[in-house]
Amino acid sequence: MSAHPAAELVELYRRWRELTTDEGAAIASERWSRVSELQAQKAKLQVAVEHATSVFPSDLRLPSELATILRDLVDMESENSRLLDQKLEAARSEQASLDRSGHNLRRLRGSYGQARTAGWQSYS
C-alpha cells in the first residue's frame, strides 16, 4: 500500500469497490462459490481498512474521492443485498414447489402401490 495514509485508504476502498462489483456479478449468475470467495476477500480487506483507519491522523483531511467511493460502495452493497434477497426468495419458492411435487408423487405412488397390492391379493 501507499505510504500516505489517505492514499492508502483510497486504494483499499477502491479494491473493496472492485470486489463488490465482482460479487454482484457472481450473485447475478448464481456462482455461489465465487460469492463466498469474494466475501472472504472482503473480510480480509476490512481488517486492512480498520487498521488503516485506526492509524489515520485525526488532523489529516480525507480526500473528496473517498467520499465518492464510499457512496458508491453503500449503493453497491445495498444492491447486492437486494439481489441476494431476490435469489433467496426464488430459491425458497422453488423449494416449496419441489416439496409440493414430492408430496404429490408420494401420494400418486401410494395410490398405484395400493391398487397393485390389492390386485395381487385377489389372484392368490
Image (spheres, rainbow, N blue to C red):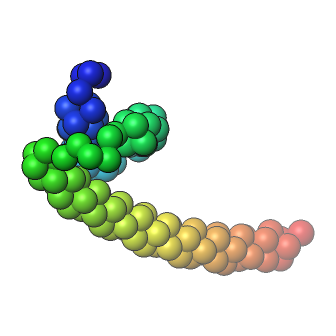
- The tally of labels here is 0
Q: In this view, does 25 lie above or below 48?
A: below
At 69% from the left and 74% from the top, the residue drawn is 110
At 42% from the left and 42% from the top, the residue drawn is 54
Q: In this view, does 100 lie above or below 38?
A: below
Residue reaching furthest right? 124
The foreground one among 121 and 78 is 78
At 55% from the left and 71% from the top, the residue drawn is 99
How far across and down, in percent of the image, does residue 84 sit?
35, 60
The foreground one among 78 and 60 is 60
Q: In this view, does 13 lie to the left or right of 72?
A: right
Residue reaching furthest front? 59
Q: Is residue 119 visible?
A: no
Quadrant holding the N terminus: top left
Q: Is residue 65 left or right of residue 74?
A: left
At 64% from the left and 71% from the top, the residue drawn is 106
The foreground one among 75 and 65 is 65
Q: Is residue 51 left or right of residue 105?
A: left
How far across and down, in percent of the image, does residue 105 sit?
58, 70
Quadrant holding the C terminus: bottom right
Looking at the rendering, which quadrant does residue 114 occupy? bottom right
The foreground one among 70 and 106 is 70
Looking at the rendering, which quadrant does residue 20 occupy? top left
Q: Is residue 103 visible?
A: yes
How far across and down, in percent of the image, does residue 59 sit?
26, 46
How far across and down, in percent of the image, does residue 35 sit?
38, 42
